[in-house]
Structure formats: C-alpha cells, structure tokens
Amino acid sequence: MTFIRTASASPFTNPVLQVAGGEGGAAPALGLLPTWNLADLYPSGDGPDFLRDLEKARIDAAAFQDKWKGKLGDACAQTGTEGLGEALKEFEALEDIIGRIGSYAGLTYYGDMVDPAKGKFFSDISAAITDIASNLLFFGLELNRVEDDVLEQAMTRDSVAGHYRPWIEDLRKEKPFQLDDKLEQLFLEKSQTGAAAWNRLFNETIAGLRFPLDGEQVALEVALDKLQEPSREARKAAAEAISTVFKDNIRIFTLITNTLAKDKDIFDRWHGFAGIADSRHLSNRVEGEVVDALAAAVKAAFPRLSHRYYKMKAQWLGLDQLEYWDRNAPLPETPAQVVPWEEARETVLSAYHDFAPEMARITKEFFDNDWIDAPSRPGKAPGAFAHPTVPSAHPYVLVNYLGKPRDVMTLAHELGHGVHQVLAGKQGALMCATPLTLAETASVFGEMLTFRALLSRTKDKAERKAMLAQKVEDMINTVVRQIAFYEFERKLHTARKDGELTAEQIGELWLSVQAESLGPAIRISDGYENWWAYIPHFIHSPFYVYAYAFGDCLVNSLYAVYQNAADGFQQKYFELLQAGGTKHYAELLKPFGLDATDPSFWDKGLSMIEGLIDELEALDKA
C-alpha cells in the first residue's frame, strides 16, 4: 500500500536520451519561465500548517488502528459509524493527508536534489510516513482475509462501502500474494534502508554528475541536449563526454543496479510472484499475456519501423551508417528555431481547445496558477514529470524547458497527464490513481493533438518533412526503445538470479537489445555500453517502461477512432479519464470498439507509425 502517489514521466526525457535542460535560468529568447508555487500544499516544510498535518497524521493513524484493527469482520455486518463504509472513509482521509505531506516533501526535493537540507527533509519525512503507514498496513491485509460472501453482503448492505467497491475488488487481486502482518510490516519498514535509500543514492549521484563540454562542467541534461545539435562534431563531443563520465562512475551504478535487482528478487520470492515482471503486471492491472503480445508485436515490427527509418535517416544525413550519437540529430531541413515559452503555451492550449474547450480550461490553470516548474537549474531533477499529489490539492508539472520543438511535445505530454490527474481526482484518494495501462493515454493523446495541429499549419515541404521525422523518432522512442528497455530489464533481472553482474556483463546485455532494436543502420561503437546507467525507470520502477509502448499503440488506435468518429467522442474520452482506477482498461476501451486483449490490436497502433514513415518516404521522392 502506498501513500505517496507516483509521478508520470515523459518518454522523451531520461529513458530515451532526450532531456530538455540547461544550467542556470532561462535564456532571454525563451522569455520568463514559471517556477511552481508549492504553497497550495504547504507554505513551508517547517511552518505550522505542515507540522500540524504531520502530527495529525501520526495521531489519526494510531487512533485508526486502535479503532479498527481486528474488527473489520464485525464492521462488515454494520452500517453507519460502526460499519465498513465508515472505516473506508477514514482510511481515505488519512491517505489524502499523508499523500499531501509526502508530495510536498518530494516536490521540494526534486527541485534541488543536491541540496543537503532538502535531501534530509525528504528522507526524514519519508521515514515519518513509513512509520505512520505501519499503523495502517493492517487495513488492506485484514480486509483481504474477510470471506468473499461477507464482503459482498457488506458492500450491498452499506451504500458507503459499496461506493468503494472498485477499490476493494482491486485490493482482492493482491490477496494471493500477501504475507502475514508482521512480515509485511518488516518489508515496509526495511524499505527505508533498502530500495528507498538506493533510489536516493541514484538520484543524488545523477544530479551531481558534471560533464566537460566547451570548457565548462555541465549537468547531464545539458550534455544530453547536445545530442540534438546540428553539428556532428558537437554531438560526438557530447557523447564522448557522457561516456567518459559514465565509465568513471560505473562501479556505483553497477552496485545500485545489482542491489535493487536482488532486493526485488527477494520481495518477489517471499510474496510468491513466479515471473520477474509479474508484480509490475499486477500493479498495472494488466495480464502478462497481453504485455507479451505487445512486446512480440513491437519486436516483429523492428525491421519495418526503426531499422527502416534509421536507414532513411542515414541517407538524409549523407552517411553510410549513423553513429549512436547521430540517432537524435536534426535533419538538414530542420529549421534552427527556439520556441519561446509563451508560444509553447499558446500552441498546447490551442491544440487542446480545438479538441475540447474543457481540456484547454483545465490546462490553462497550470499556466495561470504556477503549477509548472519550467527552467532548468543545477540540482533540479532531470527530464519531466507530472505529479498528481492528492485530490484535495492539484497536480504539478516539472519540465526542463530549453525551447526545442521537442520540448513543446514534452510540455504537451506532461500537461496531458495533468488533465488526466485533475479529472480522475474526482474519484477520491483511494480510486483516482490510474493503472499504467491507461496512465499514458492522455499524455500521448495530448502530444498527438499538438503534433497534428502544428502539422496542419505547415505548408512548406522541407519543414513538414522535418516535423514528420521528429514525430516518427518520438514514436520510435516511445514504442521501439521502450520495449527494448523492457527486454533489457528482463535479461538483467533473469541473469541477476545467478549472481552479481559486472558492469561488463550488464553492458553486454544492454548492447544486445540496442543492436536488435536500432538495426544495422546505427553503429554501436565503444562508449555506449554504459548508457544503461542513468535511466531512472530501471531504478525507480522496474518494468514500468512497457507502459509507454502500451500507451502509444493504444493512442494511435484511439486517435484513428477520433478521426473517423461522429459526435460524442470527446464525451467518451473524458469519461475514460474521469474513471481513474475504478474500471479495468478493457471496460474503458469498449465504448471505442477497441480490445487490447486481441493480439492484432497492437498491429493497428504500429501501423500508424509505419504510415508516417511511408509519408516521409513519399515526400522524399516527390
């Protein structure tokens, strides 16, 4: 059971080597970039509001345990203040206040991960939340020990308990994997000195790395941004600097990766998960065979997607073969432009408004109320994410905005998450969280709306080609690269069962999936073997990455429905987002005539990427 809701990140950030960022504040051409105002959560971490809520959470959690532990079976026979519905309401209120505390601590930390005071604050609050959560751990475990028929009668008899039926039914799916209370409490409390501690070490190590470029020592996001420079020499220099620093620090990343893989193996074995990714599938509420079908469909499409595209790109750049640092190079036709923040804002708002005014209205709140942290600065978390916080507050978005056209897509992506989180928040703290199977739907759909709006206004052939190429690359990064990452994780966690892995062994696994997914048009030369080291999803959320491919393929199919739909699509789309975690993805997709359990479903989504490559090829021949 978690009390800090996780952020949703863009696939164009760390996971695929495309971070928008830079040292210091905004460049003049970007205009004034907003920083978020966390006062809607708390004015400060040492103020009376924060300290009062922290103490209230401690007292209320202890009182909740005293009131309800050992009594949930009896509560199922009651209604009113002694009934199960009342217990669920109290539990939800606790989850909201604890989530608010944890969100504030996390967002403060992500704003500057190398500040020792903020690191200590985050660590201390995380420890306090774990202590509080230990008083609440019994609730889900005990509820799952209630007999099915007794629980069903309680939900039928008590309308308040019945309101929480989706959450209860979701919880029951975890029943086969739960341990007794003492063991679960041990796992919870040991997480502070286990996975959570290693995650923090990774965060602060990455944030503290500096890369020698152009006579300066720059942060990782700045170095990665250079991989999109028109100059091949600049891209090569950035790649070599990154490779050198990764090599110098590879021992610590190898230790972190080995430790966390073993930690996960121990957790999975004790809880009875047979497959290395089964616990992720359970938390995503998706069937393993559906993910297997997705992965198989994408891998089968490698030759006609990434292999084909990168061969074309090598020809456009006048090369026999691309080096790995050329993969994200702009095409010669790409206009050298910097998109000011206000233009990015209007671009996204306009695209969202054309689809649904309500979507633009919600998005505008992020801009107007300082719910976005846009400038890059030393110590700030690299990449981009949307953090839902809790329903009693609102989400926050973090980006590292440098003004590249791709940064506009990242902004559209994260604001799509934000809209989704606002709408799903109406379900309350227990049922607002969307499983990863659908968590990327609104973000990727928002990108597609923005891209199509921009493309429709583009009449120049060269500019259109550059835009199409960038979109294809983004989709390859979201689908092909993420499934390659998923395969890498599968290989790594499988191999780790036989003993600790050296950096060289991990590098060999990494290169094997890169060569397979990128194809023969890209040369994987020395230095790239350690580029697995900084990808945060491998550390923070093992096997998360397939959600991006799931979301992109799903949205491609969903967008095709939208293009051919009569009136009413927007309403059904909003109902999907508003559902949060109350319905299974299959039920939510049914009104659109989509069935993700059909293996051929994935080919439909992949065909849209192939169609864009066809369009690029036709433009090239015209």
Image (cartoon, rainbow, N blue to C red):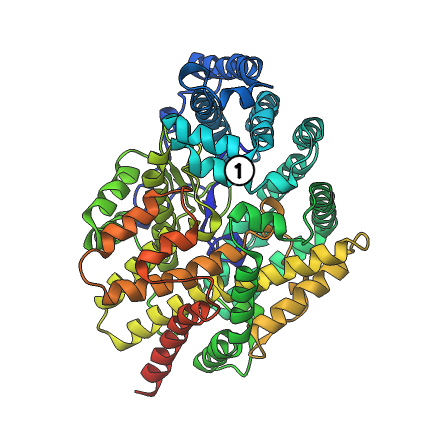
Question: With 367 as the anchor, is 87 left or right in this view?
Answer: right
Q: Is residue 185 above or below residue 383?
A: above
- Secondary structure beneath disc 1? helix
**Residue, far bottom:** 621
Q: Residue at x 66, y 63 (%)?
A: 510
Q: Residue at x 24, y 53 (%)?
A: 570
Question: With 64 as the anchor, is 459 left or right in this view?
Answer: left
Residue 446: percent from the left, percent from the top? 32, 54
Which quadrant is the N terminus positioned in? top right
Which sits in the foreground, 236 or 172? Answer: 172
Which quadrant is the C terminus positioned in? bottom left
Residue 139: percent from the left, percent from the top? 56, 26
- Residue 230 in sight from this viewpoint: no
Q: Residue at x 54, y 15 (%)?
A: 58
Which sits in the foreground, 481 or 313? Answer: 481
Q: Is residue 470 above or below residue 536?
A: below
Q: Residue at x 73, y 45 (%)?
A: 269
Residue 79: percent from the left, percent from the top? 42, 19
Which class describes the residues within 10 Å of circle 1: few (<14), some (14-19), or many (20+)? Answer: some
Q: Is residue 205 above or below residue 81?
A: below
Residue 434: percent from the left, percent from the top? 43, 44
Q: What residue is shown with label 1?
A: 171
Q: How many marks?
A: 1
- Residue 543 in sight from this viewpoint: yes
Amino acid type indicated by mark 1: Leu
Which sits in the foreground, 362 or 441? Answer: 441
The picture quadrant where one finds residue 466 is bottom left
**Residue, far right:** 499
